[in-house]
Image (cartoon, rainbow, N blue to C red):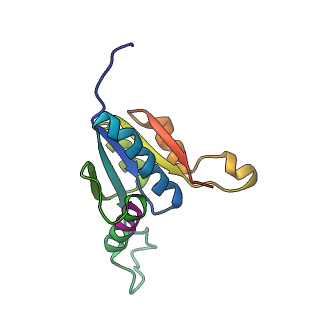
Amino acid sequence: MNAVRDVGTIVVGVDGSEASVEALRQAQGLALPLSAKVVALACWDYPPVYDGYVAVGIDDFDVRAGEILNEAVAKAFGPSTPANVEIRLVQGHPRSTLIEESKSADMLVLGRRGHGGFGGLLLGSVSSACVAHAHCPVLVVHAPE
């Protein structure tokens, strides 16, 4: 297990939270000296509906998710996205999508949405699932204080 391998791709789950913006920064900090690519990945999906009824006027989930993704990337890196950063918007649930993406990634970096007190000791459901089921190493990043 002492084999050294190149790191080619670091996938970052982006949901627009401060923790996910920090995850982008941390991933870039790891990627630059390794000449790796960073994939800023956001997920969107249609909400579950009750017996086939859809609320009128609720649509464009992909558009809003794309806006959130672009805003997070701009917040992390400024107006110019680094050349090694790929922005990707995927339809699907974050948990299953990130676990699937981890099959071809060398590392998965996620922000942790912290809550104060005892709840702050716990990981979120997506982070917990990825830590337990990802096919590559996972780094969970706290939001800056």
Name the one closer to the observer, 5 or 138.
5
Q: Position of residue 50 (x, y in %)?
A: 46, 73
Quarter of the image that includes the C terminus: bottom right
Most extreme residue toward the top, as rendered? 2
Residue 36 against residue 64 in the figure, above or below: above
Residue 28, how many percent across, how many down? 38, 46
Q: Is residue 41 magenta?
A: no
- Closest to the observer, 41 or 95: 41
Image quarter of residue 115: bottom right
Q: Quadrant of residue 81?
A: bottom left
Residue at the extreme right: 117
Q: Could you tell me what secondary structure mostly forms the magenta stretch?
A: helix
Q: Nearer the viewer, residue 124 or 28?
A: 28
66 w.r.t. 81: above or below: below
Write down the region rendered in magenta: 68-73
Q: Quadrant of residue 8?
A: top left
The residue positioned 46% from the left and 42% from the top of the image is 130
Q: Residue furthest left?
A: 83
Q: Position of residue 78 (x, y in %)?
A: 37, 63
The residue located at (26%, 48%) in the rendering is 84
